[in-house]
């Protein structure tokens, strides 16, 4: 059995309280990984072109105030 299938089976066996705790943990875990990836992409310059385009569009009046 693959590790993912094993995890799926084990998660299905959790009580409601355990499942709530797991969801809370996984949500934070997943968000932390996404933040790390975004930070690494920003440091590597992968977002520079997007930022330049956004600023260019904003200065050209193609944005709206939130």
Image: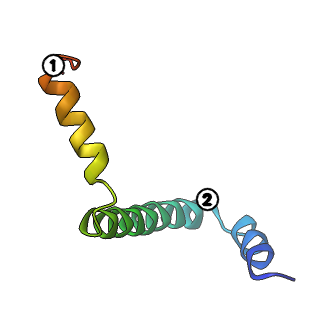
Which image quarter holds the N terminus? bottom right
**Which numbered disc, 1 or 2, marks the residue that appears first in the sequence?**
2
Q: Position of residue 36 (x, y in %)?
A: 34, 70
Q: Nearer the viewer, residue 13 or 36?
A: 36
Report helix, strand or loop for mark 2.
Answer: helix
Q: Which mark is residue 11?
A: none
In which quadrant will I find the C terminus?
Answer: top left
Whether 40 is drawn above or below 38: the answer is below
Point out residue 48 in the picture as x, y percentages from the top left corner.
26, 53
Residue shown at 59% from the left, 62% from the top: 19
The residue indicated by pointer 2 is: 16
Q: Where residue 38 appears, x then y in whole percent?
A: 34, 61
User: Which residue matches tag 1?
Assistant: 65
User: In the image, what residue occupies the spot 22% across and 26% down?
Assistant: 57
Q: Residue furthest right?
A: 1
Q: Is residue 50 left or right of residue 31?
A: left
Q: Position of residue 4 (x, y in %)?
A: 74, 75
Residue drawn at x 53%, y 67% as measured from the top left = 22
């Amino acid at each position: 059995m693959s590790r993912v299938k094993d995890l799926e089976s084990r998660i299905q066996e959790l009580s409601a309280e355990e499942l709530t705790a797991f969801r809370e943990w996984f949500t934070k875990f997943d968000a932390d990984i996404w933040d790390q990836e975004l930070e690494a992409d920003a440091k590597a310059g992968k977002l520079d072109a997007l930022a330049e385009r956004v600023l260019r569009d904003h200065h050209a009046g193609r944005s709206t105030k939130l």
